[in-house]
Image (spheres, rainbow, N blue to C red):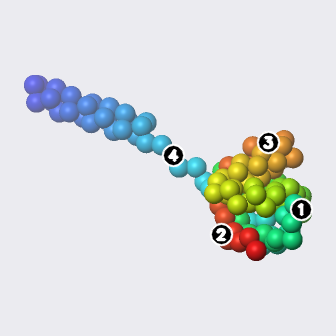
Amino acid sequence: MRNIFIILLVIAISIGSAYVGYSFVQRKEAIYAYTPGGQFITNIKDNTCLIKTDLVIEVTDRAKYKKLNDSTYKVRDLIINVLRSKTYDEMMNPSIQETLKTQIIGRINEEFNLNAADNIYFNEFVLQ
């Protein structure tokens, strides 16, 4: 009888430990990489310099990804407007990529009235 009690106790502890361990494991969200149609080449504000960039927008919701994908022309226009609004001095700032990421995400989320964009990654970033 005592052996049965010990076996049941070990099984109960094992099940409890597995449940607690499982509850602490975080599920990874699906990540969708939205590409807004290739490279951007545009001039910057009050200067003859050109910026050439290619970026990927990270989205963690399939419905938001679809919404962005269906409105690529709007997303591209928003990005071009943000890029063209920068002066040469702003573009020379070492933190310009972080600034652009924040502003582009803000404009996209504002335009689509939801938190559509989670992050942006630059594949290419050239100022000439």
The residue shown at (75%, 43%) is 115
Q: Is residue 44 visible?
A: yes
Q: Indicate left or right for 5 with 48 as reference.
A: left
> Which label number is shown at residue 123?
2
Mark 1 to mark 3: distance in Å? 32 Å
**Residue nearer the viewer, 41 or 3:** 41
Residue under circle 1?
46
Of pointers 4 and 1, the one earlier in the residue sequence: 4
Kindly state the secondary structure of the residue where label 3 is placed: loop
> Which label number is shown at residue 114?
3
Q: Indicate left or right for 48 with 39 as reference.
A: right
Q: Is residue 63 visible?
A: no
Badge 2, how many Cα within 10 Å: few under 14, some, many 20+?
few
**Which quadrant of the figure has residue 47?**
bottom right
Badge 4, how many Cα within 10 Å: few under 14, some, many 20+?
few
**Closer to viewer: mark 2 or mark 3:** 2
**Closer to viewer: mark 1 or mark 3:** 1
Of pointers 2 and 3, the one earlier in the residue sequence: 3
Mark 3 to mark 4: distance in Å? 23 Å
- Image position, residue 40 (x, y; %): 80, 70
> Which label number is shown at residue 27?
4
Mark 1 to mark 2: distance in Å? 26 Å
The residue shown at (76%, 74%) is 128
Three-letter code for the amino acid on which mark 4 is drawn: Arg
State whether residue 119 is above or below residue 19: below
Of pointers 4 and 2, the one earlier in the residue sequence: 4
